Image (cartoon, rainbow, N blue to C red):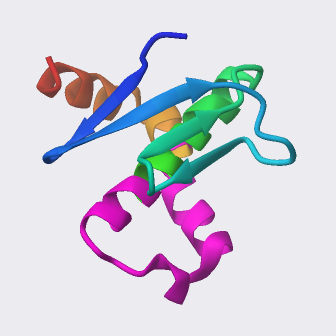
Amino acid sequence: MAFKIIKYKSKKIKVLWENCGDCHAVFDPDPLILRINPNLSKEMMAKTLFHEIWHIICWINKININKIGEEKTALLSEEFIPILKKNPKLKKIINEYLR
């Protein structure tokens, strides 16, 4: 796949592209490994990446997302996809800012 490491703050999360059983992906904070099923559709891959990045952000910033639960975490983190798909100008501006 396209990348093997996600860098955030002073951390480096190793990315492994492999089957995750019943899950699309799994973030293991100890030893900082993100496992992602490489066989997801493009849209499911994007949703999964936003979802797992949300887990990484919360863990590194010591935010207990267990208080809101996995379902709300999924709902909130995955909502970036429909917003960006329905707003191509917004997506374009974000892409330009990231260059």
User: Residue 62, percent across and down?
Assistant: 29, 75
Left or right? Give the position of 19 relative to 32.
right
Q: Is residue 74 magenta?
A: yes
Residue under the image location 21 percent in, 27 percent down: 93
Which residue is pictured at 50% across the width and 57% down the height? Answer: 77
Residue 18 falls within the magenta-colored stretch: no
- Looking at the figure, which quarter contains the C terminus? top left
Judged from this view, the residue extending furthest toward the bottom is: 67
Instruction: Decide whether the magenta segment is chiefly helix, strand or loop.
Output: helix
Q: Outermost residue, right direction?
A: 22
Q: In the displayed image of the protein, which residue is found farthest to the top? A: 2
Q: Give the residues in magenta.
A: 55-81
Quarter of the figure with residue 29: bottom left
Count of numbered circles in the view: 0
Task: Decide which of 58, 96 is in the foreground and name it.
Answer: 58
Picture layout, residue 2 above or below residue 73: above
Q: Is residue 2 above or below residue 64?
A: above
Image quarter (top left, top right, bottom left or bottom right) of the N terminus: top right
Query: In the depicted view, which residue is nearer to us: 88 or 80?
Result: 80
Residue in the image at 55% along x and 68% along y:
73
Q: Position of residue 50 (x, y in %)?
A: 48, 45
Is 96 above or below relative to 77?
A: above
- In the rendering, at what x and y percent does residue 14 appear? 42, 32
Q: Position of residue 85 (x, y in %)?
A: 52, 32
Observer-nearest of 87 and 60 = 60
* Looking at the image, residue 50 lies above or below residue 70: above
